[in-house]
Image (cartoon, rainbow, N blue to C red):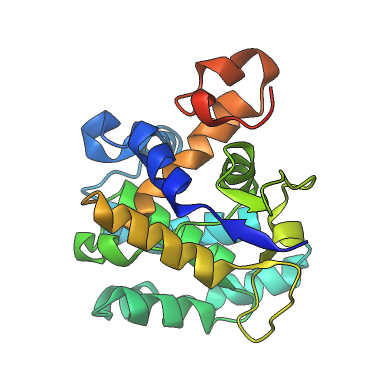
Amino acid sequence: MVLEIDEERLGAVLEALPTDDNGGVGRHAHYTRQKYETIYGITPETIADHLGTIFSITIRQRAGPQSIEQVETSRSAFDAETFQSLDSHADAYDYLTDIEGVGPKIANEYLRKVVHAFGFKQAWCGDLYVPLDQHVVAALVETGCIHDDGVRPEKTKPSALLNLNPESTPRTRLSASSLQAAFKRVAETQGTDRIAFDELWSENKFFLSIPEFREESCVSAFLTST
């Protein structure tokens, strides 16, 4: 298996995504903001006071096999004042991933929420990475943006398709950093930011993963199977 990225197809898929919906942030960011406003009372105006809250929620949701003790250790290591003082997305990403138990998955998801959904440090938006969760990766497979020499991969889980460890170079998986770079190149040709590809999450979560709604997806024209 030698996975490849079809950047031409990736560009066509991006054009089809409703990234300008809901004030130009797309449906996923709007969905996130609405959920946190409704349940926790967090708004774009109060986000700076709730950075720790969103970190705690995110790490508990994305911790995977980590124990309760490990999650608590990571949660207590986050300092909202330190995070607020950081000047760039790169600094923020490094700060988060330096916390024990916080890898790229949690760091990118947290930054997606506070920056893209809530507008904290809006200047960082252009540097955000797309959280490569199961819905985003599945949508890339479903639309043929990721393929194995023209053939649809049988598996769609990130762990099966992506090399998330920059220190290793397995030949059978696609480098996550290469995928993020492709997102950035394609997005820039359309005058937008890489995080626009995060809208793939909504397409798979609410449409592609539900058989009766697949044809209603904005990217249904690109599906490699029905």
- Does the rendering let one see residue 119? no
How far from the left and from the top, in percent, is residue 203? 51, 32
- Near-viewer residue (135 or 176): 176
Count how many numbered circles sit on residues in the image. Answer: 0
- Residue at 32% of width from left, 73% of height from top? 89
- Does the rendering let one see residue 126? yes
How far from the left and from the top, in percent, is residue 215? 56, 16
- Near-viewer residue (186 or 48): 186
- Residue at 62% of width from left, 81% of height from top? 100
Image quadrant where one finds the C terminus:
top right
Image quadrant where one finds the N terminus:
bottom right
Q: Is residue 5 left or right of residue 226?
A: left
Answer above or below: position of 79 versus 223: below
- Residue at 50% of width from left, 24% of height from top? 221
Task: Identify the image quadrant of residue 135.
Answer: top right
How far from the left and from the top, in percent, is residue 43? 29, 43
Answer above or below: position of 208 versus 116: above
Task: Identify the image quadrant of residue 94.
Answer: bottom left
Answer above or below: position of 91 versus 42: below
Outermost residue on the front side: it is 149
- Near-viewer residue (141 or 159): 141
Q: Is residue 66 left or right of residue 55?
A: right
How far from the left and from the top, in percent, is residue 6? 52, 52
- Residue at 59% of width from left, 42% of height from top? 144
